[in-house]
Amino acid sequence: MDHPLEIDARKERILRAIIQDYVLTAMPVGSRTISRKYETSLSSATIRNEMSDLEELGYLAQPHVSAGRVPSVKAYRLYVDELLSGRRVPQDAAARAYFSQRVRQMEDVITTAAQAISEITRYTAVVMMPKQLELRVSCLQLVPMPRGAALLVIVTDTGAIRDTVIRVSEKLDGDALYAISRMLTERLSGKTLQEVQEMLGAYARQSDGDTQVLQGIADLASQMAKQSATDTVTVGGSHNILNYPEYSDVDKARAFLSVLEKKERLMQLLSGSGDAFSVRIGPETGLPEMADCSVVTASYRVGSGHKGFVGVIGPTRMPYSRVLSALSAVGGVLSDLLGE
Amino acid sequence: MDHPLEIDARKERILRAIIQDYVLTAMPVGSRTISRKYETSLSSATIRNEMSDLEELGYLAQPHVSAGRVPSVKAYRLYVDELLSGRRVPQDAAARAYFSQRVRQMEDVITTAAQAISEITRYTAVVMMPKQLELRVSCLQLVPMPRGAALLVIVTDTGAIRDTVIRVSEKLDGDALYAISRMLTERLSGKTLQEVQEMLGAYARQSDGDTQVLQGIADLASQMAKQSATDTVTVGGSHNILNYPEYSDVDKARAFLSVLEKKERLMQLLSGSGDAFSVRIGPETGLPEMADCSVVTASYRVGSGHKGFVGVIGPTRMPYSRVLSALSAVGGVLSDLLGE
DNA sequence: TGTTAGCACTCTCGCTCGTTGAGTGCTAAC
DNA sequence: GTTAGCACTCAACGAGCGAGAGTGCTAACA
């Protein structure tokens, strides 16, 4: 009995065919199927021999003896590695279209990205924006609103925007508010959010003037600081998972969804790889709950030089090529929008 | 053989017990269960007789002959009507806590409300905000941002806020932008969004000055007008539905979720009743896909005098009392925030 | 007249047990 | 090296069966 030592061209062709068919149908692939649909010049018996070799090599598995073969993690890995090596990033204009409507603050961009990816791929999308320490205030402005309210807007040097509605004295008109805004911007611009927060906190306690405004600013700055100091993740299309037979069991689907709700878990799934693309298959994800999922991520550049990630989570059986294209397209758009 | 003509006190007690038990367990309720857990002074045989009467009256149904009884739509209706008639709206402080964090533009409030309701009730929540025609601009302001950008903020007389980032000449500093803002506010305040849009569109075509800004405003106004002219609905906690055995079939769950994605369908479900509370049970919902769901809604006041709705969608087997409390609490908060 | 015990009856649920069919591995021939 | 043929295996499906839950009915009782 002679052991096959490695994979040759034909074995690889067959393996690829099996992966393709399995990705399409989610059913174990039999030798007849391959011989009829993919390798018409070979008989099913020949394919059987090859498949047997591929199984011995660890690329295929049989759910049970009289079922067809199913690609193993090793097979996907081979397939994906090949895919990644020969990759030229295609810039997809379709992805850009999702962002044309509203160019707004970072959070909106992230959310839009998650939606775009989930719609394009029909899988669950995850987008991460890295934390940004040391955000500095660039401008601070009060916009008059009806009935003694004002919209407080803080803009940072990176272009992040946050606003909140605060109460102000009814006596203050637009010009008065602008005067205050100017004064505040002058004093506070260039300071980090933490500094702003501390300065105003102290102020508000001392003086008894218009503390409401100062308190509002301190609150918003603190909230902004807190939010920007932690990585942000957004999920899109979470219930796309129901479209796949792997999750026709409600308990599995629920387990999947519950992982999505824990931000820390998601972080764990997404981060890690420094490369432009990363594919983690099954156990490679690190989370036991996700043992039969794959996580495909692409990184994008954010101003500070840090990297953010866009990703897709789905069953290991996944059209990796399509998913990678989508991710690279959306990632490219994000780099453009948030980079520099 | 004598036919029972109507329900008496004891029948009603038994019926209520059956509903309670069924809501709790989702299993057909047998006579023994009632006699042991709820009406300990009566034997199961007596309960059986009563149940048989209740079935003849249309309040109960049997999935099959040797199963227990299940409440019918008519039973739920009786139960709910009673619930509604004796209702004093309890203002729940817990609901208010959800809104303490960020008081922002209307859309955020709506989203927060949907999340709050879905978390409190563990069902799928839907919140609707009615369209507001004739929104008038109250203030319009440009906030400087780094690198030749500016945040354009439009505030309406109702307190709705919308903003967008636009490009502006790098030469314009904060004061210049404020001068423009002042001028624009002066010219445009009091105008409806449609008017603003038309005026600026014409302007931008004529002049060749800083059309970028004008175009930006026109775009934002148009978008705002479009959005405020249609009712808005938001869904929260859509996958809570997976927690209920009624939807352990993935196909059912998917069908349910797909209804949630069609805004028009949702509208249909929500709107209609003018009362403070409305409960539509099973077929009463009007949508065949929702034939075994109930929709519970409460209305809240919006500034313009129109009514918005907060609602919960779930299986007909639902703890209506709890759901109503939650809705009335959140609805109350919304009335406070958006009313007047 | 209302309540209750007893009993026969019905129907679902879960189990086992063949049967079927897809797919394999092996052997022998080409 | 490839292929036809054949015996073999095992999941999936359906039928058949027993157990258990719950009913309706009848007859006795208060």
Image: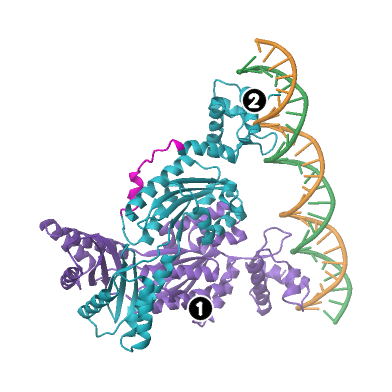
Chain colours: A cyan, B purple, C orange, D green
Q: Which mark is residue B258?
A: none
Q: Main secondary structure of the magenta part?
A: loop
Let me know if marks 1 and 2 both belong to one chain: no
Q: Which residue is mark 1?
A: B94
Q: Is residue B24 above or below residue A245?
A: below
- Residue plotted at (47% across, 68% down): B115
Q: Which residue is mark 2?
A: A49
Find residue A216 and report its horizontal and vertical position in percent: 36, 78
Q: Is residue B327 above or below residue A171?
A: above
Q: Is residue A89 magenta?
A: yes
Relative to residue A59, is residue B213 drawn left or right? left
**Callout 2 secondary element:** helix
The quarter of the image holding the N terminus of chain B is bottom right
Q: Is residue A338 above or below residue B225?
A: above
Quadrant for residue B276, please give it. bottom left
A89 vs A41, nearest the viewer:
A89
Spatial CA span between label 1 and label 2: 67 Å
Quadrant for residue B131, please give it. bottom left
The quarter of the image holding the C terminus of chain B is bottom left
Find residue B91 and report its horizontal and vertical position in percent: 49, 82
Kindly tell me whether residue B129 is visible in this rendering: no
Kindly identify which chain the residue marked by label 2 belongs to: A
- Residue plotted at (29% across, 81% down): A147
Kindly identify which chain the residue marked by label 1 belongs to: B
Relative to residue B139, is residue D9 drawn left or right? right
Find residue B268 and report its horizontal and vertical position in percent: 43, 62
B21 vs A88, nearest the viewer:
A88
Crowdedness of circle 2 by 10 Å Cα count: few (<14), some, many (20+)? few
